[in-house]
Image: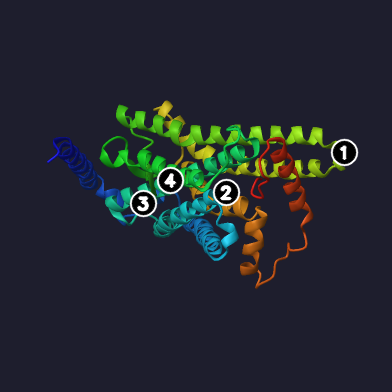
């Protein structure tokens, strides 16, 4: 009965039809690229190279699935872990699990076969799944950084970090990823084979103006903004901790030790982010900016594999370096024993520093601050 509602449904149906028609048309035009004829792919890399790539990614994919699934299970079994500051950590594990299962495993199979065996439709679905879960994970990292900044530095004054804020951050990461990964399904941008032609991703090589504009926007909103959030948040956090150290020199170096621990955590976080995402983002942007640039397919495949390997790095860095998660998780990995059970001094030092920061800002101390 609502004309505007009917019009919206019509346009959704129309653009969906256009998007899938373009996919089917591309399928007819490029079906040879998805055939088991390995002549073209063997010219890119020898058969042994595909086997090596498949083996490496296979190890990381299986490890990523197991570690992230373990994080989710442990969180469900331990009530003390289900608190607002840990929501983004668990959300990161969910996103990494999806990326490893729906992106890593299919790529292992197709790479082992030496060609993309899932067809054109499979290419689009695989690329969308990897991009959707990958960007959601990337945004979760930014949300974690922002959460820590809000709790420790208190830029909002007396406003406390609550469940609704944590849920908003989690929801925002998925909505943001969905917004920027669905346009290729409807004609703005696209998904194509990449690297050694055994996996799919955004169409970096297209010279079409619309596709190039999408890639530039994609780089800006899905990489530059999350990275800037991480850098600004943790820089502010370290600055606050240094202020605490100067004010608490009489404590015998306890806060200084905590500062070193937090600094190490921050450096590892930023380096892991750069290692897994900067090569891929730089490659994509350089191809768009320099249309005639040629990059060897094998070299171009390395950044793609690095991003998929991040599903292992994230749970190790963001979960197992957190004392609460580590204490609850290690018994599952070490037959009921926790090798770090007696090593409490470093954690207590970290909590002391955060408590001092909290007192300065007139808030209650948080055990989840880095």
Ranked by sequence position, the earlier of labels 1 and 2 is 2
Label 3 vs label 4, nearer the camera:
4
Is 322 in front, or is 156? 156
Q: Neighbour class for label 4 at 10 Å: few (<14), some, many (≥20)?
A: some
Q: Neighbour class for label 3 at 10 Å: few (<14), some, many (≥20)?
A: many
Ranked by sequence position, the earlier of labels 1 and 4 is 4
Q: Residue at the location (46% across, 30% down)? A: 286
| Residue 327 visible to an observer of this rendering | yes
Ranked by sequence position, the earlier of labels 4 and 2 is 2
Measured as percent of width and height from the top left, residue 162 is found at 54, 45
Specify how the rendered protein is coloured.
rainbow
Disc 1, disc 2: CB below 8 Å?
A: no
Label 2 vs label 3, nearer the camera:
2
Label 1 vs label 4, nearer the camera:
1
Secondary structure beneath disc 2? Answer: helix
Residue 73 lies, with reference to residue 111, above or below; the image says below
Q: Residue at the location (85% across, 37% down)? A: 249
From the image, tell me which residue sits under label 4.
Answer: 171
From the image, tell me which residue sits under label 1.
Answer: 250
From the image, tell me which residue sits under label 3.
Answer: 126
Measured as percent of width and height from the top left, residue 14 is found at 17, 40
Give the CA distance from mark 3 to mark 4: 23 Å
Q: Quadrant of the C terminus?
A: top right
Is 134 in front, or is 191? 134
Ranked by sequence position, the earlier of labels 2 and 3 is 2
Q: Residue at the location (52% across, 48% down)? A: 88
Circle on res. 85: 2
Give the CA distance from mark 4 to mark 2: 14 Å
Residue 299 lies, with reference to residue 113, above or below; the image says above
């Amino acid at each position: 009965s609502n004309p505007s509602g009917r019009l919206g449904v019509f346009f959704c149906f129309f653009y969906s039809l256009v998007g899938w028609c373009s996919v089917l048309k591309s399928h007819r035009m490029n079906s040879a690229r998805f055939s088991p004829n390995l002549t073209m792919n063997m010219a890119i890399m020898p058969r042994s190279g595909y086997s090596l790539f498949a083996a490496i990614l296979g190890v990381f994919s299986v490890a990523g699935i197991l570690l992230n699934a373990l994080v989710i299970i442990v969180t469900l079994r331990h009530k003390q872990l289900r608190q607002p500051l840990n929501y983004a950590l668990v959300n990161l594990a969910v996103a990494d699990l999806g990326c490893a299962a729906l992106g890593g495993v299919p790529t292992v199979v197709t790479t082992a076969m030496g060609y993309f065996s899932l067809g054109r439709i499979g290419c689009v679905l695989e690329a969308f799944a990897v991009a959707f879960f990958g960007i959601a994970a990337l945004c979760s990292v930014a949300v974690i950084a922002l959460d820590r900044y809000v709790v420790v530095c208190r830029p909002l004054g007396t406003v406390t970090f609550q469940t609704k804020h944590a849920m908003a951050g989690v929801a925002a990461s998925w909505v943001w990823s969905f917004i920027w990964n669905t346009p290729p399904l409807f004609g703005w941008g696209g998904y194509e084979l990449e690297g050694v032609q055994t996996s799919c991703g955004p169409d970096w090589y297209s010279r079409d103006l619309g596709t190039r504009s999408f890639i530039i926007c994609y780089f800006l909103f899905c990489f530059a903004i999350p990275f800037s959030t991480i850098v600004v948040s943790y820089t502010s956090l370290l600055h606050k901790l240094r202020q605490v150290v100067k004010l608490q020199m009489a404590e015998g170096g306890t806060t200084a030790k905590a500062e070193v621990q937090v600094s190490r955590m921050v450096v590892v976080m930023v380096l892991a982010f750069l290692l897994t995402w900067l090569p891929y983002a730089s490659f994509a942007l350089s191809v768009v900016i320099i249309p005639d640039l040629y990059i060897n397919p094998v070299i171009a495949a390395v950044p793609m594999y690095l991003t998929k390997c991040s599903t292992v790095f994230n749970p190790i860095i963001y979960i197992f370096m957190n004392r609460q998660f580590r204490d609850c998780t290690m018994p599952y990995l070490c037959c009921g024993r926790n090798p770090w059970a007696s090593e409490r001094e470093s954690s207590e030092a970290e909590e002391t520093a955060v408590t001092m920061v909290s007192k300065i800002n007139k808030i209650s101390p948080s055990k989840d601050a880095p």
